[in-house]
């Protein structure tokens, strides 16, 4: 490794620390991804032989540790124990990424199939390996395509069983979590608008289109097309921003100075 520049050496060391891979494997993955760390993680974890490294007996032991005593699933209490073992806050967005990898159908629940298949796909069969993969899963949020997949997964994962729409309070909590990672200057105003004007459950169409709006429309709305095919709720949001003088179209915005004036209650 002495022939490598300092920047490349640092990436090799970082890759080895996160994945537990050998220097040879680290070099192979990094070279294959043109020295992009996130791409190298994808190369490493997509290798079919990774699954072969997991011990099914250890996976069963992990599942048994967190399984609910009354049903053959991991429920909220078991996930709380798992988070404690991983030294991760249950509200940490990385637990959403974990659920995405496990293809979990419902928030705060893992079936045995979801849990074991998800860990196999990640090459995890011990708590130590699980902790090592957490940093990799955080990097996945920085990948544009994976963030989109995780964002869209979150809708079905967070909604109540049997419901087509996502409860407003839950949707707001998820947006604040997701857009804290993928910063969107208007997220707080969007949540305030929904509470003031909408106060209803959120459809899947609105959920998916909002990410597109956040990605493509400048926070100053300078490139917003009123004739575009946005859901009515997003169009109403733009009107709300203009009505409250939050936006000066095409002008730089000092968000620290923007506060919506709320009417005072009459005594």
Image (cartoon, helix red, strand yellow):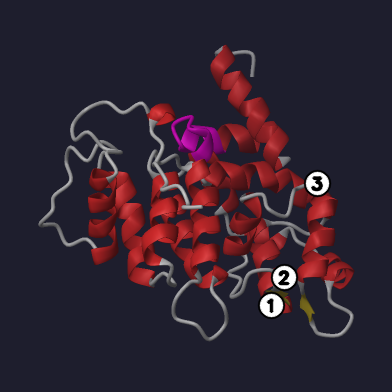
Considering the image in quadrants, where does the N terminus appear? top right
* SS at badge 2: helix
Disc number placed over residue 87 in the picture, else none: 3
* Residue 247: percent from left, percent from top: 26, 37
Q: 17 or 207, which lies in front?
A: 207
Q: Residue at x 23, y 52 (%)?
A: 239
Q: How many marks?
A: 3
Label 1, label 3: how far apart the Cα atoms are: 24 Å
Q: Residue at x 53, y 73 (%)?
A: 159
In the rendered image, which quarter is residue 106 located in? bottom right
Task: Determine which residue is flagged by label 1.
Answer: 113
Task: Determine which residue is flagged by label 2.
Answer: 116
Q: Residue at x 55, y 17 (%)?
A: 7
Q: Residue at x 38, y 65 (%)?
A: 198
N-terminal of the pair, mark 3 or mark 2, is 3
N-terminal of the pair, mark 1 or mark 3, is 3
Q: 227 or 105, which lies in front?
A: 227
The secondary structure making up most of the magenta span is helix
**Span highlighted in magenta in the image:** 29-38
């Amino acid at each position: 490794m002495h022939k490598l520049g300092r920047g490349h050496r640092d990436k090799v060391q970082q890759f080895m620390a996160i994945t537990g891979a050998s220097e040879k494997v680290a070099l192979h993955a990094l070279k294959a991804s043109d020295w992009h760390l996130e791409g190298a993680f994808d190369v490493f974890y997509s290798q079919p032989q990774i699954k072969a490294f997991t011990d099914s007996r250890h996976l069963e032991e992990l599942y048994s540790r967190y399984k609910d005593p009354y049903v053959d699933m991991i429920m909220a209490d078991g996930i709380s124990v798992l988070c404690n073992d991983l030294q991760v806050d249950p509200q940490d967005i990385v637990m959403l990424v974990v659920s995405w990898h496990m293809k979990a159908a419902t928030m705060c629940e893992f079936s045995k199939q979801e849990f074991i298949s998800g860990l196999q796909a990640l090459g995890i069969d011990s708590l130590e390996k699980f902790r090592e993969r957490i940093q990799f899963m955080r990097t996945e949020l920085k990948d544009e395509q994976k963030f989109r997949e995780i964002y869209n997964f979150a809708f079905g994962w967070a909604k109540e069983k049997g419901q087509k729409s996502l409860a407003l309070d839950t949707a707001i909590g998820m947006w604040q979590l997701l857009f804290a990672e993928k910063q969107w200057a208007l997220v707080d105003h969007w949540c305030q608008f929904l509470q003031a004007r909408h106060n209803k459950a959120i459809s899947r169409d609105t959920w998916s289109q909002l990410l597109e709006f956040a990605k493509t429309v400048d926070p100053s709305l300078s490139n917003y097309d009123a004739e575009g095919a946005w859901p009515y709720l997003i169009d109403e949001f733009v009107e709300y921003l203009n009505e409250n003088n939050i936006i000066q179209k095409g002008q730089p915005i000092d968000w620290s100075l923007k506060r919506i004036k709320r009417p005072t209650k009459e005594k």
